[in-house]
């Protein structure tokens, strides 16, 4: 089951790929190996994605792919995150696995 939130091609979740992303405000989605959404986040994308790598303290276990969507400001990215989380909740009756853990 692929539950696409951000409409972009998924990229392999590696430090090398992330270092090529803009360090700009945006929305990001972490996906497991089946490309199912496990986390939707917002902020300064490169920094946020690097912090979620398995070797970091704020890691998201099971993330294999990611998608991004740029925004003009962090505030706009956070607004989009809320919008996407609400849409996800309407579609699946729950938040993505790691959004549930963070909001619990």
Image (cartoon, rainbow, N blue to C red):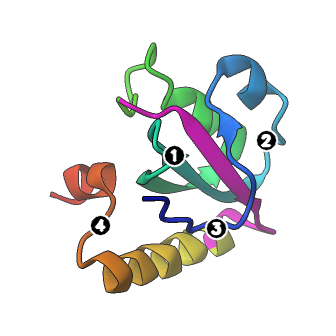
- Residue nearer the viewer, 91 or 60: 91
Give the alpha-carbon distance from disc 3 to disc 4, as whole Å: 18 Å
Instruction: Give the residue pinned by disc 2.
Output: 23
Q: Residues within 10 Å of mark 2 (few under 14, many from 20)?
A: some
Question: Residue 49 at x, y = what percent?
Answer: 59, 36
Q: Residue furthest left?
A: 104
Instruction: Give the residue pinned by disc 4.
Output: 95
Give the alpha-carbon distance from disc 2 to disc 1, as whole Å: 17 Å
Q: Residues within 10 Å of mark 4 (few under 14, many from 20)?
A: many
Give the alpha-carbon distance from disc 3 to disc 2, as whole Å: 13 Å
Q: Residues within 10 Å of mark 3 (few under 14, many from 20)?
A: many
Instruction: Give the residue pinned by disc 3.
Output: 77
Q: Does 14 lie within the magenta span?
A: no
* Vertical arrangement, residue 104 with respect to residue 65, above or below: below
Q: Does 68 lie within the magenta span?
A: yes
Q: Residues within 10 Å of mark 1 (few under 14, many from 20)?
A: many
Q: Which comes before the other along the chain, label 2 or label 4?
A: 2
> In the visual, does 90 lie left or right of 4?
left
Determine the residue positioned at 61% across, 43% down. Answer: 66
Mark 3, mark 4: which one is toward the viewer? 4
Determine the residue positioned at 34% across, 86% down. Answer: 90
Instruction: Give the residue pinned by disc 1.
Output: 30
Residues in magenta, as a range: 62-75
* Vertical arrangement, residue 31 with respect to residue 103, above or below: above
* Quarter of the image where the N terminus is located: bottom left
* Element marked by disc 4: loop
Give the alpha-carbon distance from disc 1 to disc 4, as whole Å: 13 Å
Q: Which comes before the other along the chain, label 3 or label 1?
A: 1
Q: Which comes before the other along the chain, label 2 or label 1?
A: 2
Give the alpha-carbon distance from disc 3 to disc 1, as whole Å: 15 Å
* Element marked by disc 1: strand
């Amino acid at each position: 089951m692929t539950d696409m939130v951000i409409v972009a091609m998924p990229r392999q979740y590696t430090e090398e790929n992330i270092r090529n992303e803009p360090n700009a405000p945006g929305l990001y989605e972490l996906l497991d190996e089946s490309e199912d959404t496990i986390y939707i986040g917002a902020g300064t994308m490169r920094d946020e994605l690097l912090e979620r790598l398995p070797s970091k303290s704020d890691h998201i276990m099971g993330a294999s792919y990611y998608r991004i969507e740029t925004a003009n400001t962090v505030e706009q990215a956070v607004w989009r995150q809320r919008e996407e989380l609400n849409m996800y909740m309407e579609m699946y009756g729950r938040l993505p696995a790691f959004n549930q853990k963070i909001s619990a």
